[in-house]
Image (tube, rainbow, N blue to C red):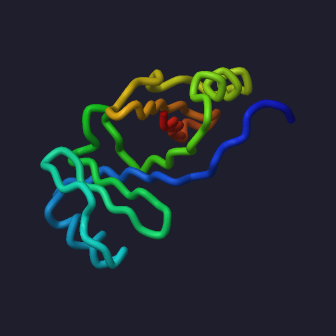
Amino acid sequence: MTGSSTQGIKTVLHPVSDLAAAKKVYAALLGVAPQTDESYYVSFEAAGQHIGLVPDGGPQGMTSPVTYWHVEDIEAKLAEVTAAGATVKEKAHDVGGGRLVATVTDTDGNVLGLLQDS
């Protein structure tokens, strides 16, 4: 196997229908207050993980949690996984601060996220 490796799963986003209620549950689970607390996104940092709550699945229409594999070169990783049979769901795009994200579906339709920090 050749190509670039990942830095592991460090980010998981969860679609939620009631952001206020979900925020209480995740704060209790993780034992920390939210790092970001906005009407469009709530996030927590705990044990090296970034956990995000996305109201109603956000603009990307999430219907289940999405794990984000951190990578050094998102375009190279997209090329590798699509060559192996994945399908691009959401092209790489900047979500702020130079952070790039993209999603693909595997051969069974599971959504996999890729994330590159600048």
Vertical order, 36 against 21 (above or below): above
Q: Answer with left or right where residue 47 lies relative to residue 52.
A: right
Vertical order, 109 against 94 (above or below): below
Between residue 90 and residue 61, name the one nearer to us.
90
Residue 111 drawn at (x, y percent) = 51, 39
Residue under the image location 27 percent in, 48 percent down: 54
Vertical order, 60 against 25 (above or below): above
Residue under the image location 61 percent in, 25 percent down: 78
Residue 70 drawn at (x, y percent) = 56, 43
Residue under the image location 21 percent in, 72 percent down: 24
**Residue positioned most to the right:** 1
Q: Answer with left or right where residue 74 lies relative to residue 1.
A: left
Quadrant for the N terminus, please. top right
Residue 32 drawn at (x, y percent) = 30, 74
Residue 49 drawn at (x, y percent) = 47, 61
Give the mark count.
0
Q: Answer with left or right where residue 118 lies relative to residue 33.
A: right
Residue under the image location 14 percent in, 63 percent down: 20
Vertical order, 54 against 80 (above or below): below
The quadrant where residue 104 appears: top right
